[in-house]
Image (tube, rainbow, N blue to C red):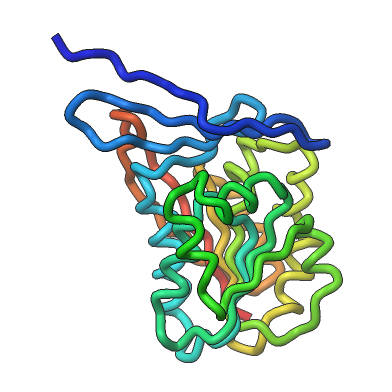
Amino acid sequence: MTEPEQHVEVARAESERGELVLRRRTRPGAPDVLELRVNGVFVMDTLETGSEIEMAALALDLVEAPVDVVIGGLGLGFTTQRVLADPRVEKVTVVEIEEPLIGWMRDGTVPHGPGLLADRRLQIVNADISMAVAEARQGHDLLLLDVDNGPHYLVHRDNAELYRERFLTQCRELLNPGGVLVVWSSDHSPELAARIATVFGEVDEKAYDVLLQDRPETYYLYSARR
């Protein structure tokens, strides 16, 4: 009989938006897995990172010179890691609203965090992505948004604004001509696709199949060019 998976809490923090929990899943004969939950909702883990990596790879393939990249959402760092692996990239700004998560990455609570954050091209900004985009200046080649589970499975209710035309228009204005926006979603969203197309003139949808804790799931990447 297969022994059951064990869950061990690694770190916990409270913010004005609620509770963040980092826990370790262990199973005999298998590598340990770190899992991030926000207000009890699964956000991501270190086992199934394919869609986070693909998000970065897709964006990088769409721009000839992705010199300056903005990423909304640090998570466990896999999108950032893939962006930094591209030698064309000279500057990466990651906007993360949850200060404890940044701390866990910096202090080694997330083991691969210190090495990732040591890259001199990387700047971590502790802020709300909506405010950061509103206050930023134009001049970015890529803008990657992975700050929630998508418009249909919000971790924070206020994040609904991030999938509406007003914010998407601000994202468009932030990009250089030819720059690309990519938005991650855990679910198919024709409404989001339509809004992006309204703002940018077109949108491309890509489905990405994953195996999440032994369950088949499909995530979606929505991209558009200024």
- Residue 33 is drawn in which quadrant? top left
Locate the N terminus by quadrant. Answer: top left
Is residue 179 in view from this perspective? no
Quadrant position of the C terminus in the picture = bottom right
Q: Which residue is drawn at 32% across and 27% down?
A: 26
Give the residue at the far left of this rendering: 1
On the image, the x and y values in percent for residue 114 come to 50, 60
Residue shown at the point (80%, 82%) measured from the top left: 137
Indicate the position of residue 205 as horizontal and vertical percent values: 47, 59
Residue ranking furthest to the top: 1
Q: Where is residue 195 in the image (x, y as percent from the top left)?
A: 68, 58
Left or right: 150 with respect to 32? right
| Snapshot quadrant of residue 210 | top left
Outermost residue, front side = 107
Judge from the rendering whether residue 133 lies leftward or rightward of residue 37; answer left or right: right
**Residue 3 in view (yes/no):** yes
On the picture, is 134 further left or further right than 146? right
Residue 204 location (% of width, % of height): 49, 65
Could you say which is closer to the camera, residue 81 or residue 70? 81
Q: Height in image: 16 above or below 120? A: above
Q: Residue at x 76, y 78 (%)?
A: 173
Of 173 and 140, nearer the camera is 140
Q: Residue at horizontal 57%, vertical 59%? A: 183
